[in-house]
Amino acid sequence: MEALSLRDDIGDKSALAGQNTLQLIAFSIGEQTYGVEITTVREIRAWNGATPLPNTRAYVRGVINLRGTIVPIFDLRARFGDGQTSPTKNHVVVVMSVGDKWVGILVDAVSDILTVNRDEIHNVPEGNSIDTELLNGIVTHESRMVGLIDLHSVVMGAKMDA
Amino acid sequence: MSDLDDFKATYFDECSELLTELEEQFAAIEAGERDRERLNAVFRAIHSIKGGAGAFGFSALVGFAHAYQTLLDFVRDGRVELTDDVVTLCIRANDIVADHVNAAQSGEDLPANYGAEEKARFDAIARGETNSEAADSGDSGDEGGEIVEDFDIDFTPVMVNLDDQHGRREAPVDDVFEASPVASVPEQWEVRFTPHRALYARANDPLLLFRELAALGQMQVRAHLGEVPPLSDFEPFAVYCAWEITLISPTLTEEAIREVFEFVDGDCDIVIARLGDAGAVAPVREAAEAPAAADAEMDLSSLLALTEDEMAQPAEFAAEPEAEPAGAQDQFEDAPGMSLAALADEIKPTVAPAPVKAAEPARPVASMPPAKAAAPAEGDDAGRGSVGVQSIRVDLDKVDRVVNMVGELVITQSMLTQQMDETLRARYTELVRGLEVLAQTTRGLQDSVMAIRAQPVKSVFSRMPRLVRELATKTSKKIKLETIGENTEIDKTVIEQLSDPLTHMIRNSADHGIEGPDKRLAAGKPETGTIRLSAEQAGGNILIVVEDDGAGINRERVLRLARDKGIVAPDITPTDEQIDQLIFAPGFSTAEAVSDISGRGVGMDVVLSNIKKIGGSVHVRSWTGKGCRMTLRLPLTLAVLDVMLVKVGDNPYVVPLSSIVETMQCSRAAFERVPSGGRVLQVRGEYVQVIDLGQRFGMVPANAPDDQFVVLCEAEGSQKVALVVDDIIGQQQVVIKSLEENFERVDGIAGGTILGDGNVALIVDVQGLRTTHIHQNAA
C-alpha cells in the first residue's frame, strides 16, 4: 500500500515537472547509488525470500509470487560482479516492467526519489565494457554520483549469457 | 465502422466453423455415407458462407460459392449423381472456398481466375448431367430414399377430406404402414414467402429456395407482382415481389419447409399453413393479396406499422376459434380483411396437431403486438430441433478469467485445509465440515469451468485431411488419412497449441515417412500409404498419435548427422530408441538437414518445444520399413495439475502425479553404477535410470541420510526414471504458472506453481530431465 501512495505522489510531481526532467527511483548497493526511471517501477517490496531456480546464473536469485504471477528476481550486486547479496528482511526488491515482462531486482535499500534534468546526464566513461553495458548514464545529485541502470542489459543480458 | 469490423470478425469465426463442418461432412461422404442430411449440411454451410460474403462484398467468394452451390443443388435434387469424381471436385471446391475466405480475411488478393477451372467443371457437370436427367433422378431416388419431383411440374389441386385425415392419424400404426405412400392422402401446404431487403442484401437467391422446396413435393409458385410500381417510381433496392407456394406431398411436415428457409430466417416473412381442404386455398390467397397490394414496400418496419394499425381486427378473429375450436377452415374464410402478419399468427396455430390447442396460442395474439408474438413462435418452430444443444459464443478471455479465479480459489482452499492442524480440527468441527464442503464445491466448480473450455480435437483434426491431400499432390504419393477419436475433448488452449505441431508431424509422415507408390509396391505394401491420426484420453493426459506405415526412420543417417553436428559424441553408441528420439534434439533439424535426411527431422524441435510449452511431451518410435509412430502426451488442461509435493534441499518441488508410478524409500547402496557414471536402481527386476534431483538442481545436499526417498516416474515410451528427493510431502492440486511469461525456459523445469503459503514451487519436467541426461551423457 505504501508503495502505491508513494507513486501517486510522484505522479503529481512529474505532471508539474517539465518534459526535460526525468524522475528516478534511487537505491543503494553498498556505498553506491543507482537509479531507474520511475515509470518502469511497478512496486517496491521487502525481501521475503525467493525460490531458487536450478541451473541458472548466480545473479538470478530465483522467482517470487507476485499476486499469482511468477516473477524472476535478479541480484543487482551479483550482476555487477560483486558477489551475491546476503539478503535480510531490510533488503528490498524493486519490481519493474521491462518490455512485456515483469522482473524484480534485489537492492540494499531504496533511498530517494530524484528529479534530474535530462541535460545533466553524463555519458558513462568508456573503458570497462561492463559499465557501459549496464549503465545508461551518470547524473550527479547533491554531489553524489547516481548510475542510471540499463534494465534491458541487466535482464536481457541474463538471457544472452545462457 | 467498428461495428462492421465486429460483424466481419464474427463472420470469419463462423466461416472457420463452417469450413470445419465441411471437412467433417466430406470425410463422411468420402467414406461412403452419402445421405441427404450430409448434403444438406454442406449446402447450408456453403450457403451461409456465401450469404455473409455477399453482405461484406467479397464478390469472388460469392461467385465461386454460388457456382459450387448450384452444383450441390443439382446433386441434391438428383440431377447430378454423387460420383467419386464429384466428391473429389467438391473437396477441392471446399479448399478453394477456404482459400477465398482466408484471402478475404487477410485482405490479400487471389489470382483473378482462381478456382475458374473448378467453376467451369461445375457448369460442365451440371449441363452434362441435366441431359440424362431421367436416368439420374431414378438413381438418386434410390440413394436418397426420396422421390425427386421436377421443379417445373404443374399440379392439379386434390380435394382432401379433413375427417379422413384425422381418422388416418388415429388409426393403428400398422394401418399407416399398409397404405402405400401414393395412395395415402397427400398433405397440402401453403407457403407465403415475402422477402425483406436484407435477404437480397445477404446475397440469398429466392430461386434456390424454390428449388429446395420443389424437392419436397409437387409445387406451384405464384408471384405477387401487384405492388411493383410504375417504372418511374421504381426503387432499385426495394422489394416489391412476394410469392405464394403450394406444395403437395404425402410426407411433408412443417419442419421440412421451415428448414428450407432456415438461412433466411429473419430476413423474410414466412407463413406456412397446412391446408387439409384444397378448397381453403383460394380465400387465403385473396387474404394475402389484399394487404400486400396495400403497402408498396414489404420491409419489417412498414409491416410493424401496418400490424399496429390493424390490431383491433385480429382481436375479433382470435375470439372466434375459442368458441369454435374445430373451425380451422372457418378462420381462413373469414380472413380476407386481415393483415399479413395477423394472418401469420392466425395460420400458425392450425399446424398444431389438435384443433383445441390451436385456439389457445391464438389468444395472446390478440393482446400483444402480433409481430412480437410471431417472433418467438418462429424461433421455436423453425426447424432448430436438429441443433439440439444450445450454445453461446463467449470471448475466451472471459472464460480465462474465470479459470484463473477458480485456480486461485483452489489454491486458497488447499491452503485453508493445510492450515487446519489436528488441534484445530478437534476444536472446530463445524469449520472442518464447512471446509470439506468448500473443497467439494471448489472441485465441482473447477471441473465445470474446465468443461466449458473443453473442445473436441475435431477442430484441429479436421484441418488435416486438406493438408494430406495437398502433400500427396505435391509429393506425387498416394496417402490416405484415417482419424480416430476426434471427439476426444481437450482444453481449448491446448487445442490451439496443437495445430502447429500436428501439422509438422503429419507433414513429416507424408514427406519423409511414406514412400512413393513404386517403392511401396516394391516393398510389398499397398500403393496407398496410410497416416493414422488418433486421440484418446489416458488418465490425466490426452494421447495424440500420428502413425504411418512408411519406411520408418533411417537410423544410420540420423546418427551420422547427429555425430556430424556434435549432438552425439563419436564414442557413444545410443540405442535405437535414443536415435529415434534424436530427431527432436535442438539443433538437429537445421535447414541443411531437411534435404539431407530421408528419415525425419523437419522442424521436429519446433514440435518438441511447442508441446513442452503446454506441458506435454513427444515420443517417437520407428520400425524400419514398417512405419513410425509419434506420440504426443498432453495435459487435459493447462490450468490445474494434480501433483506430488517433494522437497529437494530446502526447496519444494512438485512432480505431476500423472507421471508418477510409485514412491518408495530405499538405501543409497541400492543404486548401482553404470559405465557412463550414471546410476541405476533395480525395481522389481527392471533397471531404472536414477536422477538425483538435489545434485541435478545444484542444491547443497542435506545431511544425506542413507535412506533416500525415490519417486518412480514413467517418462515417454514406458521408460521409467527414479527421482531421488529429500522428502515426500504429499499430494495436492496446483495451478500451473508459466516461468517464461516473465523469465525464460529453465532446463528440467516445466513451470512453476504457487503453494498455499504463497511460495513458488517449481514443477519437475520428468521427460526433460531424462532426455537432457541422455544428451549430457552423450556429449
Image (cartoon, rainbow, N blue to C red):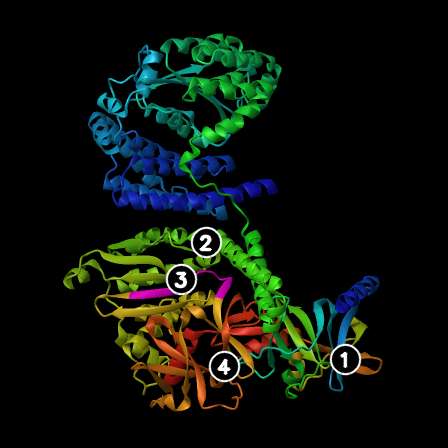
Mark 3–mark 2 Cα distance, whole angstroms, equals: 19 Å
Name the residue beneath numbered marker 3.
B501
- State which quadrant residue B234 falls in: top right
Three-letter amino acid code at disc 3?
A: Pro
Q: Nearer the viewer, residue A60 or A144?
A: A60
**Mark seen at residue B454:** 2
Q: Quadrant of the C terminus of chain B?
A: bottom left
- Residue located 32% across and 22% down the image: B217
Q: Badge 1 sits on which subunit?
A: A
- The answer to whether marks 1 and 2 sit on the same chain is no
Q: What residue sits right under mark 1 in the picture? A: A146
Q: Main secondary structure of the magenta part?
A: strand
The magenta stretch is: B629-641
Q: Amino acid at mark 4?
A: Asp
Residue A50 screen position, x and y as percent: 62, 77
Looking at the rendered structure, which numbered label has been put on residue B727?
Answer: 4
Residue B251 x, y percent position in the rendering: 31, 24
Mark 4 on the same chain as mark 2: yes
Cα–Cα span, label 1 and label 2: 54 Å
